[in-house]
Image (tube, grey):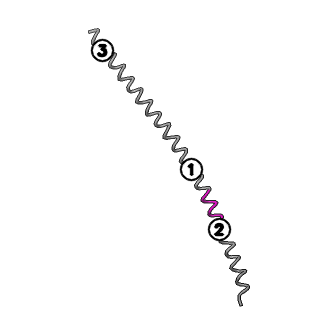
Amino acid sequence: MAQNIASAVEEQTATTEEISTSAQQAGDTVTQTTGLIQKIAAGNETVYRSSKQVKEAAEKLNNLFKDLQKLLASFKV
């Protein structure tokens, strides 16, 4: 009987260790995933700012083009 109990305790200990290891690995995966999501968010912010700058530059270029068209129109015969 004592041997059966000892065997059961040993088996339960091994199972508990496996669960603990799996939980730790899951926690590590969550931590890594969170880090990747944060990097993606930061990258998205960079892309957004860059896109905004490109849009602003394109608007300025368009305004310069319009001004140039007006200036050239004054030279037409």
User: Which residue shows up at 30% across the image and 12% down it?
Assistant: 5
Q: Earlier in the sequence, mark 3 or mark 2?
A: 3
Label 1 residue SS: helix
The label shown at residue 61 is none
Amino acid beneath label 1: Gly
Residue in view at x 62 percent, y 60 percent: 52
**Quadrant assignment, res 50:** bottom right
Q: Residues within 10 Å of mark 3 (few under 14, many from 20)?
A: few
* Magenta stretch: includes residue 63: no
Extent of the magenta region: 50-57
Going from N to C along the chain, the mark reached first, 2 or 1, is 1
Question: Residue drawn 65% across and 71% down?
Answer: 62
User: Which amino acid type is marked by label 3?
Assistant: Ser
**How far apart, in angstroms, are the residues tagged by discs 3 and 1?**
54 Å
Q: Which residue is mark 3?
A: 7
First reached walking from the N terminus: tag 3 or tag 1: 3
User: In front: mark 3 or mark 1?
Assistant: 1
User: Mark 1 and mark 3 in contact (Cβ < 8 Å)?
Assistant: no
* Callout 2 secondary element: helix
Tell me where residue 39 appears, x and y as whole percent: 55, 45
Dot 2 alpha-carbon crowd within 10 angstroms: few under 14, some 14 to 19, many 20 or more: few
Residue 60 appears at what percent x and percent y? 68, 68
Would you identify the image quadrant in which residue 17 lies? top left
- State the CA–CA distance, disc 3 to disc 2: 77 Å
On screen, residue 53 versus residue 8, left or right, reads: right
Pointer 1 residue: 43
Would you say 55 lies left or right of 15 here?
right
Q: Is residue 16 above or below residue 60?
A: above
Callout 2 amino acid: Glu
In which quadrant is the N terminus drawn? top left
> Which residue is tagged 2?
59
Name the residue furthest left: 1
